[in-house]
Image (cartoon, grey):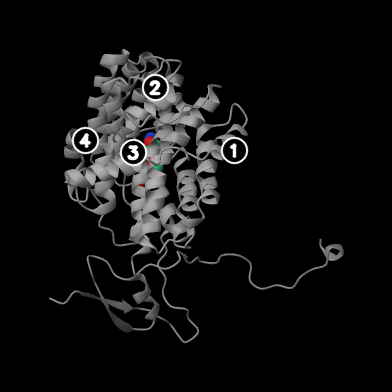
Amino acid sequence: MADTITITDNRTGKQYDVPVTDGTIRATDLRQIKTGDDDFGLLTYDPAFMNTASCRSRITYIDGDKGILEYRGYPIEQLAEHSTFLETAYLILFGELPTASQMAEWTHDITMHTMVHENIKKFMEGFWYNAHPMGVFVSTVGALSTFYPDGKQIFEEEARRRQIVRLIAKVPTIAAYAYRHSIGRPYVYPDNGLSFTGNFLNMLFKMTELKYEPNEVLARALDVLFILHADHEQNCSTSAMRSIGSSHVDPYSALAGASAALYGPLHGGANEAVLRMLKEIGSVDHIPAFIKGVKAGDGRLMGFGHRVYKSYDPRARIIKKTAYEVFEVTGKNPLLDIALELERIALEDEYFVQRKLYPNVDFYSGLIYQAMNFPVEMFPVLFAIARTAGWVAQWEEMLLDPDQKIARPRQIYMGATKRDYVPAAARG
Ligand code: ACO
């Protein structure tokens, strides 16, 4: 059977055979379908890219109906159990799990690039004391491009690798500085003797002790959360990374744009929104009234629903388990009871069942972060640290893909037709 689709244009009676490859047709193949010589050709209309594949990718596989998430073929559940964030970042970037020597070199490279230029520190000091750390993060990552002009050499493999290492290594430092800035504490330099997440906790929470000793359970929990957030194929921020990167700008500028996309409450800001919502609900008794309000269109149940996952979000299940491990150390987050009851009621409610709305990764991550003493403003920043691995991997894949060009969607123009300029005095 031929892998083609035959389209009959009822406007003209003409038929067209369009090839089907990997379950898709090329949108540009539709351009031959015209009603006449002055017709531009058929376009597809797909706001929010609901049904458009923008690239071929070998990085992350998601089956939203079955609740499957895999990085380079490895199930997220196995990676969360056995891998580390740095190893997973290597896998996402290079396609294979590293050998022992590759892992040692990778860890060494990342560890040696964790410091930021002293002027970055000064730059960050310029922010107002109550600046949102995500705003500080977005701006500072963008500012890195001015420190590393070789970031523009995007088609030189070694230079590209240097920027990738710098970005993965420096984002925790920038994130920690943004946090310390917001609470008026001095910045803490990286400690090369600690693991990736152990060092991050050091830069966040070290006080006057000579050597910061991270709690192993908390460091591991953070590592698992970073693994879960490392990539998620063509989501809003990753599409932004690819789209901005398609102009061949340096990766720092592209990553600043991707983090800006992540900042929004419908994306990486959702866990912050979940906590605000749980606080607003205040007690288990208020849940029925809150659910009633949501069903009446009065706001959304934050942390529920996903564009892709329509059975469950596999990351939510792992996170729920991690939450209990963290609460063993930190004590239970008092909002947990509200979250559990909200989840129970929503999962039984016709409105949510019918719309296939399940808890997503952000429903519980905020509770964990809060129990670990992170202020809510830091939540999207933590997400950005992890997602940096995915962003740079997707950026590099886009650059090396011969099919890709500068991203440039079409529009359907609905405005006024041509008319002549009217001088101000003559306007009605
Ligand atoms: N609470 C209540 N109703 C919801 C919710 C929700 N959280 N999510 C979707 N719905 C309803 C919509 O009102 C709509 O109902 P209708 O058909 O009666 O109009 C229906 O479910 C479909 O919703 P859409 O908005 O069309 O679904 P979409 O795929 O565009 O949205 C999204 C996905 C943005 C994640 C949405 O579910 C949402 O806003 N959730 C809350 C925010 C959130 O948790 N975001 C985090 C996403 S995960 C991440 O970024 C890591």
Residue named by callout 2: 370
Residue named by callout 1: 123
x and y, in percent, of residue 53 in the image? 33, 61
SS of the residue at dot 1?
Answer: helix
Image height check: is 47 above or below 237?
below
Mark found first going from the N terminus, 2 or 1: 1
Camera-near label (2 vs 4) is 4
- Mark 3 closeness class: few <14, some 14–19, many ≥20 residues within 10 Å: many
SS of the residue at dot 4?
Answer: helix
Q: CA distance from mark 3 to mark 1?
A: 38 Å
SS of the residue at dot 3?
Answer: loop
Instruction: Evaluate whether residue 395 shows in this view.
Output: no
Q: Nearer the viewer, residue 405 or 10?
A: 405
Q: CA distance from mark 2 to mark 3?
A: 22 Å
x and y, in percent, of residue 281 in the image? 43, 19
Amino acid identity at mark 4: Ala
Residue sitting at x 41%, y 31%? 190
Amino acid identity at mark 1: Phe
Q: CA distance from mark 2 to mark 1?
A: 28 Å
x and y, in percent, of residue 39 in the image? 48, 81
- In the rendered structure, are the residues bearing label 2 and label 4 in contact, judged by CB atoms less than 8 Å apart? no
Instruction: Evaluate whether residue 37 shows in this view.
Output: yes
Camera-near label (2 vs 3) is 2
Residue named by callout 4: 80
- Mark 4 closeness class: few <14, some 14–19, many ≥20 residues within 10 Å: many
Camera-near label (2 vs 1) is 1
Mark found first going from the N terminus, 1 or 4: 4
Image height check: is 122 above or below 279?
below
Residue sitting at x 45%, y 53%? 251
Q: Quadrant of ligand 1?
A: top left
Mark found first going from the N terminus, 4 or 3: 4
Q: Is mark 3 within 8 Å of ligand 1?
A: yes
